Image (cartoon, rainbow, N blue to C red):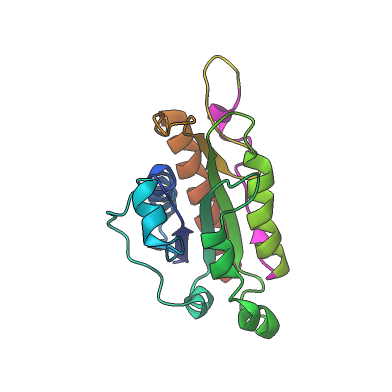
Amino acid sequence: MAKVLVLYYSSYGHIEQMADAVAEGARSAGADVDIRRVPETAPQAVVEAAHFKTDTAHAEIESVDKLAEYDAIVIGAPTRFGRMPSQMASFLDQAGGLWYSGALVGKVGGAFTSTASQHGGQETTLFSILTNLLHFGMTIVGLDYGYQGQMGVKEVHGGTPYGASTLADGDGSRQPSDVDLGGARHQGKRIAEAAAKLAG
């Protein structure tokens, strides 16, 4: 049984919903799944003024060293000007020891994201996360085109071959759709299946 970590940062709850869906998909493939969030680094005044969502069912991850305990790590974060937000970057920046020791080499990695608009930097944000995972020596699993939900243009939806995604609109009013959540589940399942094969 593969052990999978879904690690995320979410300001308004969109990525948190996607994290739950990724975890659901991984569990459907028989994985043992933990969902953890990275610490909030924005000042409390900013958190309150921006009305960040602070009530969550998921605990913070204890330390970056915990990453080495998993067969697969799926990282979710919203975009900040076409890249991952500082909260996630700050956490991953602490992983130098894991990189140096090769503790994550051969593990499976993936990413998912959200943006305000359809062209708001989903793919560049995913690549900013995946670049870290590749430097750690991880095997990347994206959202393959076996998930047909990401095809077509009849409705607004997320989904890229590099990872599941959703759109929040500029005011955060749009919630992840069934298509978006389906993509997250599909990717989670694929990641868990790949991790089980590599671990076995």
Residue 79 visible within the image:
yes
Q: Which residues are magenta?
A: 136-151
Q: Quarter holding the N terminus? A: bottom left
Residue 52 in sight: no
Q: Which sits in the foreground, 178 or 89? A: 89
11 or 19: which is nearer to us?
11
Occupied quadrant, residue 90: bottom right
Q: Residue drawn 63% across and 52% down?
A: 141
In this rendering, is residue 186 above or below 38?
A: above
Residue 157: image location, x then y, percent: 52, 27
Q: Is residue 49 above or below residue 178?
A: below
Residue 169, percent from left and from top? 48, 29
Q: Residue at x 44, y 46 (%)?
A: 15
Where is residue 98? Give x, y as percent: 62, 80
- The C terminus - image quarter: bottom right
Task: Indicate yes or no whether the magenta region holds residue 146.
Answer: yes
